[in-house]
Image (cartoon, rainbow, N blue to C red):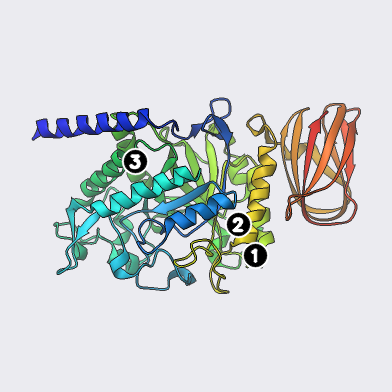
Amino acid sequence: MKQLTLLWKLFLLLAAFSCSSNNKTAPISLHPDNPNYFLYKGKPTIIITSAEHYGAVMNEDFDYAKYLAALKNDGMNYTRIFLGPYSEIGADLFGIKKNTMNPAPDKWLTPWVKDTVTGKYNLDKWNEAFFNRLKSFIAEAQQNDVIVEVTFFTSYYGNHQWSNSPFNLNNNTLVTDSLDFRNVNTPDNGALMGIQEKYVRRIVQDLNTFGNIIYEIQNEPWSDNPILVEKISDVDTLVHPFAWQKIVEIANTKSLEWQAKIAAIISEEEAQLPNKHLIAQNISNYRCKIENPDPRISVFNFHYAYPEAASVNLDLKKAIGLDETGFMPHNDFHYRTQAWKFMLAGGALYNNLDYSFTVGFEDGTYKIDEGTPGWGGPAYRKQLSILKNFLESFSFIHMKPANEIMKVNNGSLAAFQLLAEEGKQYAIYLERGNAPEIELTIPDGNYAAVWVNTLTGKEERSEEVVSTGGKAMIKYQGNIEDIALSLKIK
């Protein structure tokens, strides 16, 4: 049996090597000159998108070819997918209408074969239709220059989701333990750990040849196993009306121990394969200073993040992402300003959860229902592409957050965010003001200033700015909802 196992692994290794030798796309990695950003296809890379609700592979009714083409057409370069152990089937969960993670029962694809008579999953037998669709999806994404975050696991949030999971004792043919959903993704999960390990290894083996993937261990681990870190006092209750939007939680010790085990399994399996991929870890909502990071982790993700989630963690020399946002009023501005401020605070990845992508509307044109807890649509994706193009107009790998060099002398301004390479280039975002006069502490010289409309991408005006005595004064005439300023040495 050991000989057969070794031969199988040798076969996989040779197959992977053969495929990768014909694949010119090396896996996305951290940029060697600035690991707060990515390197992909030989270029410094930031990831910005407004993408569907994670069901593109598991929901067989979803036309992912149309979806991925729409992302590319809108200038987006990322999507996030959930895999087999979780769905939101059979309920209108979280107020999401036409939820792609609520497929028709016979259209939910999982990694395991399901008996059509008993309705139980055989966790010893792979469902090859699932793996074929997964690989086809990743390949199609690669053709469309879309990077995919492959999320292995998620919190269950409640008994409904857990009652549907293939891992639940009542839904499979193996003798697994009767578990509370809060213990599923912890070391206290009994025989399930071995099943989870086989599942992770199979995914890693199958996807090794692809360059456009990042592995994420678990979505929102703090939801099932929380530790309170902070009660936020400065919350705008009109934008963030819910009680959970006023607290920061991280995962507890048992959850972190289990996550470290999964990261070790991914790394161990890839050690036998040609390609090595980045591993991401979901840290918290809003903001948190990361302590004692797992050295295997290269991407630290936050949800609904404040700018400081990025800026206070850049010293880790890893990429900081905002890989889910929503639960704000249906208004482009709330989402747009969150994206601009996070990315100009040193963020490497931004993903809005876009509910305009549904079955039958894979081009992202579904009119989002008022009660749906998030936003998106073609107009908003266009605005995100303006942010992406703006940042890509800079040599951003040489820049870092520098709000301390700016102050407002006259007029009004609600907020700003500034990314800078001293004496060379400055990306500045201004939010809600009236005729603000800003003072910049920058080296002497002549700078080309260009004001960019964040809604249209058009240059509103350009001017020369002169810094003398280490100070430069710039004034914007008129009211501002939000606007961007590019400042570069001449």
Q: Which mark sits nearer the N-terminus, 2 or 1?
A: 2
* Residue picked out by circle 2: 232
On screen, residue 401 versus residue 87, left or right, reads right
Q: Amino acid at mark 3?
A: Leu
Which quadrant of the structure image shows residue 256? top left
Callout 2–callout 3 Cβ contact below 8 Å: no
Q: Is residue 228 visible?
A: no
Q: Is residue 490 above or below residue 214?
A: above
Label 2: state its secondary structure.
Answer: loop
> Is residue 198 or residue 450 the one in the foreground?
450
Q: Amino acid at mark 2?
A: Ile
Q: Residue at x 47, y 57 (%)?
A: 66
* Residue picked out by circle 1: 239
On screen, residue 172 versus residue 461, left or right, reads left
> Is residue 138 or residue 255 the one in the foreground?
138
Neighbour tally class for label 3: few under 14, some 14-19, many 20 plus, Cα within 10 Å: many
- For marks 2 and 3, give the CA distance: 40 Å
Q: Residue at x 34, y 36 (%)?
A: 208
Callout 1–callout 3 Cβ contact below 8 Å: no
Q: Is residue 483 visible?
A: yes
- For marks 2 and 1, give the CA distance: 14 Å
Question: Which mark, residue 88?
Answer: none
Q: Is residue 19 above or below residue 99?
A: above
On screen, residue 359 versus residue 270, left or right, reads right
Label 3: state its secondary structure.
Answer: helix
* Residue picked out by circle 3: 207
Q: Amino acid at mark 1?
A: Val
Q: Residue at x 32, y 45 (%)?
A: 258
